[in-house]
Amino acid sequence: MAKYVVGSTAEIGPGQRKIVAVNGISIGVFNVNGVYYALRNRCPHQGAPLCLGSVKGTALPSQPGEYIWAREGEILRCPWHGWEFDVTTGRSVCSPQKVRVRAYEVTVDPLESAETEAVVETFPVTVQSGNVVLHLPS
Amino acid sequence: MTTFLSEREARPTRERRVGIIDCDVHPGPRSVAEIKAHMPMPFRDRWNGGGRGFFGNPVHGARLDSNPPGGGGAGSDPDFLRTQLVEEHGMAHAILLPRSFCNLHPDPDFGTAIAAAFNDWLAETWLDKYNADGVFKGSITVAHQDPHAAAREIERWAGHPHFVQVMTDSGARAPFGQRQYHPIYEACAKHDLPFAIHPGTDGMGINVQPSPGFPTHYIEWHTCLSLAFQAHLVSLLTEGVFEKFPKFRVVLTEGGTAWIPGLMWRLDAEWKALRTEVPWVKRPPSAYLRDHVRFTTQPLERPEDDRHFLQMLEMMDAENLLMFSSDYPHWDFDSPSHAFPKLPEALHHRIFEANAREWYGL
């Protein structure tokens, strides 16, 4: 695993995202209610920049005429064809077994941590913030 | 008829462009004012843009990444459209179909004025000011509420070097083969301009909905858009439009393709028994397609198994009848590099370039 600092927690607040390029791969890093997730920025359907899509909730499977809106902030929609993806797993809502986007591990490390091998970009730090670190297979 | 430099005269000065020909691209004005500037009073005051009304896409109507960085709506910036569509996919030409929604208005004069304003705008901007390289080819919008006025609008643009077809919405009050529409087809045939039918305004304004009654949801309405195309095609074939106007040609744009084999088998079978009802239909109806009808590919109906897809293409005579389209910038955009499975090279060339080149004389 190679580790990359992609930003600070102050920079990517709850409900926000940051698109980064690591080793030529475009990756979206999302803050979902304080927990960070990372997905490859390429829709498995037709190659659209997936991570530019809207992040909202979804209507859960329900009885006819019943609407159950849930998972607010956890569902990413492709900006082209509107396919839904679970930000927390990378799996699609329409076909979770077959259609999924590559998900990467993300951790929040203390600012003083010097373990990271590379810094994607520099950023201002604050006392309250930590480093958002993306883990990629070597 | 206005006099334009004919395509034949204009072409030698320009290099022939090679690459994909996209047969369904939607440019839009930067603002409502751009269209209004071409509209005479009293219509200028009455028209304030506006879409089709009901059945808006509940998710998003256009690719979210198609909004030009400099502002304006999707498809309103020619430089950005060139970058994101034409250059990205190596396109020779984009056939432009603006969405005026003129066909839903009960007042035919208003509909005709909207169509004319869109044509004047398109001719001045995308087909001229933005078109130094000749990549853009346009469609003459007509309001089919008044077929004689529509024919006059076609006459007004005939001979223009970049208008390559006439277009209208599939939303209508009657199937398109019926004789009240024939003045439009006579004008199209006279000037060798194909008549493109594009989804829109079905069940809106004065137009009937092609399903039994109004569907509840966008997903139903949008899926069933192909029903109107099937009905229009059966009507055009059985009313003998292609016998009456031997040079008349039709493009079914964004109406689906997978239904072609089944519908034609059904119609041909009916014709064997019922041809005396329509004796002017001199050949099996499906035999008219190759000379008179083309279909654009988006939204591509693609089975899970690619072998089935290739079989389907063979059944529908895709190598002669299909022309690639992306529907850029709309939400159901088909990417030239991802929408299709791998095709045999010759078939790919026919669908992505050659069929449209021959059909539109590009």
Image (cartoon, rainbow, N blue to C red):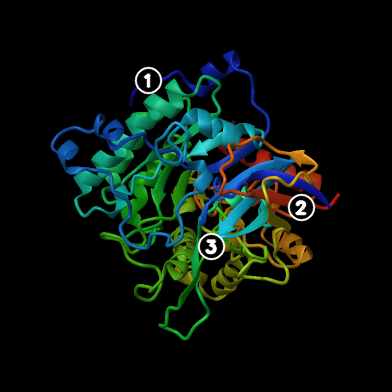
Q: Is residue A27 left or right of residue A17?
A: right
Q: Closest to the observer: B118 or B70?
A: B70
| Number of numbered discs on residues | 3
Local packing at callout 3 (Cα closer than 10 Å; few below 14, some 14-19, many 20+) is: few
The subunit letter for the residue under badge 1 reads B
The three-letter code of the residue at mark 3 reads: Asn
Q: Which residue is mark 1?
A: B3
Q: Is residue B339 visible?
A: no
Most extreme residue toward the right, as rendered? A138
Name the element at disc 3.
loop
Q: Closest to the observer: B294 or B209?
A: B209
Q: Which residue is mark 3?
A: A33
The three-letter code of the residue at mark 2 reads: His
Name the residue rendered at 53%, 47% in the picture: B327
* Mark sitting earlier along the chain (2/3): 3
Q: Which residue is mark 2?
A: A135
Instruction: Answer yes or no: are tags 2 and 3 on the same subunit.
Output: yes
Q: Closest to the observer: A51 or B214?
A: A51
Most extreme residue toward the top, as rendered? B13
Q: Is residue B300 visible?
A: yes
Closer to viewer: mark 1 or mark 2: 2
